[in-house]
Image (cartoon, rainbow, N blue to C red):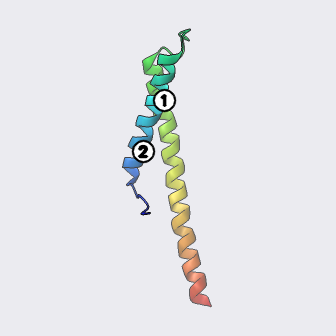
Amino acid sequence: MKKIRLKPWQLYAGTFVLLFAINVFIRWRDPRGVAWADNLLQSLLMTIALTIGFAVGDRYRRKNEKHQQEIMKRLKEMR
């Protein structure tokens, strides 16, 4: 099975859409109509905040992965 590689912006856009859809679904399914969940602007801002957090973490992970590969390459050259 071939591994799917997305560009970072595609991954972040997909994450945003998925989080926003989950947020809207929760608002739609709640029969009580929780006041803080009914505000669409607040839901949008929280989704943006979560997506930014995901993007920062993913960029940090990608940078560390690149450095780890470089270190392993240099260690193999030393042998």
What residue did someone put label 2 on?
A: 12
Q: Is residue 7 above or below residue 65?
A: above
Image height of 32 relative to 51, above or below: above
Q: Quadrant of the N terminus?
A: bottom left
Q: Which residue is painted at 56% across and 88% down in the image?
A: 77
Q: Are marks 1 and 2 in contact (CB under 8 Å)?
A: no
Q: Residue at x 42, y 63 (%)?
A: 2
**Residue 22, which numbered label?**
1
What's the residue at 47%, 17% (across, down)?
28
Density class for disc 1 (Cα within 10 Å; few <14, some 14-19, many ≥20) is few
Above or below residue 19? Residue 26 is above
Cα–Cα gap, marks 1 and 2 = 15 Å
Percent coordinates x, y for residue 66 in the rendering:
51, 67
Please indicate whether residue 77 sits to the left or right of residue 42 in the image. Answer: right
**Which residue type carries mark 2?**
Tyr
Q: Quadrant of the C terminus?
A: bottom right
